[in-house]
Image (spheres, rainbow, N blue to C red):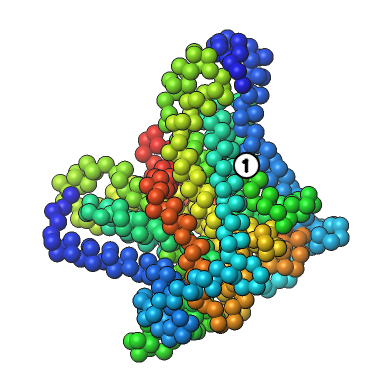
Amino acid sequence: MKKRTIRADAIYYTFVVLFGFVMLYPILWLIASSLKSQTEIFGNAASLWPSEFKWENYLVGWQGFGRTGFDVYFLNSAFVTTFVVIGAILSSSIVAYGFARLQFRFKKLLFACLIATVMLPVQITLIPQYIMFHNIGWVNTFYPLIVPAFLGGTPFFIFLLIQFIRGIPRELDEAAIIDGCSTFGIFWRIILPLVKPALVTVAIFAFMWTWDDFLGPLIYLNSADIQTIALGLRNFMDAESGTSWGPLLAMSSLSLLPQFIIFLFFQKYLVEGIATTGLK
Amino acid sequence: MKPTQSTLNPTLKMKSTKGSIRKDLVAYLIISPWLIGFLGLVIGPMIASLYFSFTNYDMLSPASWVGLENYKNVLVNDPRFVQSLKVTLIFVFVSTPLKLVFALLLAMLFNTGRKGTGLFTTIYYIPSIIGGSVAIAVVWRQLFGREGAINSLFASVGLDGLNWLGDPTYALTILIILVVWQFGSPLIIFLAGLRQIPLELYEAASVDGASSLTRFFRITLPMLTPVIFFNLIMQTIGAFMTFTQAFLITKGGPMDATNFYAVYLYETAFEYLRMGYASAMAWILLVIIGVITLILFATSKYWVHYEGGNK
């Protein structure tokens, strides 16, 4: 590698810091503006420091608009997200084990199907799925959002775990077979404990994407008392008549908080998960 | 499941047909969650969707067969469809390359071995995590609003503000900026790819007196092509499906300037309940994405270089 000069370092760090600031500006702006008064949000729009901290935006926002408070939206989001994470972990780990380790008829064909569904646009199944869930009476319940997760609904997770399991030495399985372990026993006692880091990655992605999801809840959750935060914010956004930007921005900030916390704690796994699946 | 006689003796089991049927059954049981989901939530719905695309169906009365009429109406008689396809294609073909160029340039910058790379990668990745959320849509609407932060920055340097989201010329650009801003995951994939390139290649090139530009075009870029290809496919398909931002920030407007395919499809299916028509649109989308993916795969053999054994 080339010898580096102090000047090159200075240019590098100046650029990286300035660009990083531009990258984060919208998020910093959101947090700052959530503490501004209505007049300042518009009068002093670009600044990142409120002249007076309006903490009550958070209290007012928490009440929501209309009859539903944000406590309801948060609980609903937490409920859906928890079950989707559990479903994703359970279904994708066992299915990935099957594809990575077992031999069966039509395996190649089914694996090709799995990979194809990673790239399938959601729009193609959206309408018939809706009609189906409508016909079995699941519209306006959490089932359409949760049940698919238990059925390997995000093939990307299965793919990620297959890649990971392929890296585990097969000798471990063989030793377990000699010790009298069943096929399922190998999964439970050998593979599952070793695949934990990858499962953390799956759990984080499942959390992030479900927490963020807007289209699913928009289609399936009609009544306010079962809606998620994404919809709560949308309702708020549509209802605000130019008087409650502060509370709206406060609730927007709050909606990102769980994602930030998870991100801060587990970013290593997220980065590894992306890097490894990208490379195959 | 308890260990049984047959699993205790794997060699024997593999030879007998009876054992292999049992083995198949166990394997199918193990992949059954996905298999059920695949049949019930993907293949079944796809067949249903294909059927609906040949019908008039509003969910209130039974579907009535109309043959190819939906396809004809979408492709020939629907200017809004043409418009939505046009803006979607512009969006895909502008935002995806821009995103990848940003990701690659920054990955190369971060790959110079300076301290703090991890921290900056993390910071640059944050927008990718939350960029699709409603909260960020709220932010974008305000940032680029008439009295928003961007116009206030304009005013501070003596420029007139613009009606960013209300003007068809700018609205699409604003949504492209939002998506390009989320270049974090291709950045991380590029960074991992760069770290796989053997340093000896660069050393050998330096000995031969290759300039840094030559090294980039002769070593870095060719070695990265598999990763570029992967990012290109994933980002292109993702861009076609963009919905939330356009739906919330511009509501498809002004004058359908941001009426993305996914937004128009949603509106047709779930606001007007024209399920048959929307199903035809979904299949046309699948064909378009399929054709573009095939073209990318077909051309890839001319520019994607795999090292031996890494196919």
Pick the quarter of the image with the C terminus of chain B.
top left
Q: Helix, strand, or loop for circle 1?
A: helix
Q: Which of A93 and B281 is in front in this view?
A: A93
Residue A47 visible in the shown view: yes
Residue A33: percent from left, percent from top? 43, 75
Report how many numbered discs are placed on residues in the image: 1
Pick the quarter of the image with the N terminus of chain B.
top right
Residue at 40% across / 76% down in the picture? Answer: A53
Q: Nearer the viewer, residue B27 or A32?
A: A32
Chain letter of disc 1? A
Residue B55: percent from left, percent from top? 81, 58
Residue A155: percent from left, percent from top? 57, 43
**Left or right relative to A142: residue B243:** left
Vertically, is A46 above or below A202? below
**Left or right relative to B20: residue B166:** left
Residue at 54% across / 36% down in the picture? Answer: A93
Vertically, is B64 above or below B42? below
Q: Which of B273 and A237 is in front in this view?
A: A237
Residue at 27% across / 42% down in the picture? Answer: B198
Residue B190: percent from left, percent from top? 36, 51
Residue B71 visible in the shown view: no
Residue at 48% across / 21% down in the picture? Answer: A173
Quadrant location of residue A261? bottom left
Quadrant location of residue B271? bottom right
Where is mark 1, residue-wise?
Answer: A150
**Left or right relative to A125: residue B140:** left
Vertically, is B177 above or below A87? below
Q: Which amino acid does label 1 sit on?
A: Phe
